[in-house]
Image (cartoon, rainbow, N blue to C red):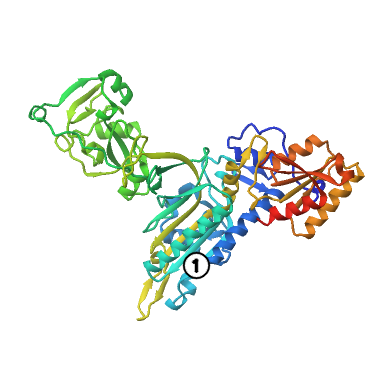
Amino acid sequence: MRQNTLLMPTLRDTPSDTEAISHQLLLRVGLIRQLAAGVYSYLPMGWRVLRKIENIVRQEMERTGAQELHLPVMQPTELWHESGRYADYGPELIRLDDRHGREFALGPTHEEVITSLVANDVKSYRKLPVNLFQIQTKFRDERRPRYGLLRGREFLMKDAYSFDIDWAGLDVTYKAMFEAYHQIFSRCGLRFTAVEADAGTIGGEGETHEFMALADVGEDTVVTCSSCQYSANLEKAISGSGPASDELTPGERSASVEKLHTPHTKTVAELVTLLGVQAKDIFKTLIYVADGDPIAVVMRGDHNVNETKLLNELAVTTLELADDVTVMRVSGTPHGYVGPVGLTIPIYMDDEVAKRVRGGIVGANEENYHLRYVVPGVHFSAYRQGDYREVQAGDVCLHCGAPLQFDRGIEVGHVFKLGTKYSEKLGAKYLDVQGKEQPMIMGCYGIGISRLLAAVIEQNNDDHGIVWPKQLAPFQVHIIPVSVKDSAQVAIAEQLYKQMLTAGIEVLLDDRDERAGVKFKDSDLLGIPMRIVVGKDAVNGIVEFKERHDEERLTLDQETVLAKVLALAQR
């Protein structure tokens, strides 16, 4: 490719409305351009990299026996009603009506469509297992698109769906896909970890794992053990149990609940200051509305509610903190003074509260008052007790007791065991050996292709620009004649260019009539792995060779540099 005709509009300055390094570099290098919030055009260089990612994904999927197909973007919403997900997706599901008034959705994922397809065309156990995948544009109307390709409304995704006759078969398929994902992300030069995760709106009946690219800009928190192999998304993470407090002394057991005057003291921090206690000695009561019904959650003052755990415990679709009107209606007091004693709505008590047998401080359900020495199970009863909290710094591993570590991560892949969630509802059934109808056991497996592009850049950059892993670089070699007006430089540059093309090397020739400084800055910004500079020593057949990730510059003759490029390209 000759750079003079390449559409690669680089930017000298960082766009002011960007936060993520990957977003900045994608725009500065000229890989993408924004059309609307969360919607991007891929320019030639960006598309070259995406195609390389696709090829790696395609190769590893086909290695597992998965077959590629292509499904419609427009999906009749009747399928979403059948699966029960129409309401679950809410406003993220982009809906439209055709001229006949029939409602469609732009596919954010394709569980319904693929299940309907297989239900109609696979009827016997002899045709199973089958694993199907596609690489296609998806749509989700994100409330807040941000970070460029990391959270967009239109994005490129690989989604695969497996159909087995039983759970043992799904286990085999799941393991194969899990290992294929490790191969894909390793080949892309990514630093990643696989973590236990929550299934979210995809749902399912079995285990699920997210693949996280470690990066400070990541929107997810990854929890890992410092000693054993345990790792999980914060939404799913659990920690080792702390010791229970000592048994009550006879005096403490007979102690009466004490009412405290706490004017203008609504928060845990304010109570700590006023009463000189620790946050863990306070039991905060939060009012939630779950599918329209109010509930109370009682937590230690130094712990946060894990709303994903709570949502799963409740088995509801919607969960949100109650507004002031609801709080007043169910407790008789403003927010900040609510406590579990005397509440008539269901109380969900966290395990760590249940251990505090010495009691704690709670709201008195009366403005400007709290209660002291309130003992769980004695002064109030829980409708249900469980692990409803987020793990936090200082917690230890449930499995080995070692400290837990916290990192930020970008979700680039997710694998699910779906079971019969979709096959039962959409009629994907087969006849077994005895001729009896059985539901297919499903799995699904997604990779964010465009998000992966951004994650790779997020991990591979320096102060000058992108530093591409060689497997994904748009070109392997960048040839730069310092002056296109120097016939000796142009002659050697052209010879090397043609020799490398003949050898199957992807090479970009900077044939622009630009200043050397501009060419070098653009080269560093673009980040091609190998650079050959043809300068004043061209008359002697000498050029300069440099690898993007290394500061060392080598002075080589034309034949030697060609041999070096061929050797490095084959590694």
Residue 184 position within the rendered picture, expressed as x and y whole percent measured from the top left: 55, 56
**Residue 86 appears at what percent x and percent y?**
44, 54
Q: Secondary structure at mark 1?
A: strand
Point 48% across, 61% down: residue? 177
Report the side of 163 relative to 505 (left or right). left
Residue 78 appears in the figure: no
Q: Position of residue 204 (x, y in %)?
A: 39, 58
The residue under label 1 is 131
Depth check: 44 or 38 in front? 44
Asked whether 293 or 177 is in front, the reply is: 177
Q: In screen coordinates, is 262 left or right of 373?
A: right
Residue at the image point whose x is 31% and y is 24% from the top: 266
Would residue 123 be found to the left or right of residue 524 on screen? left
Residue 277 spot, x, y in % from top left: 25, 23
Badge 1 density bin: few <14, some 14–19, many ≥20, Cα 10 Å: many
Q: Determine the residue located farthest toward the bottom in the rendered image.
A: 434
Q: Nearer the viewer, residue 516 or 499?
A: 499
Residue type beneath disc 1: Asn
Residue 308 falls in which quadrant of the image?
Answer: top left
Visible residue check, residue 376: yes
Q: Is residue 531 above or below residue 425?
A: above
Looking at the image, which is closer to me, 175 or 353? 175
**In the visual, does 433 lie left or right of 522?**
left
Vertical comparison of 118 with 365: above or below: below
Q: In which quadrant will I find the C terminus?
A: bottom right
Which residue: 81% across, 56% down? 499
How many labels, in total?
A: 1
- Give the quadrant of residue 100: bottom right
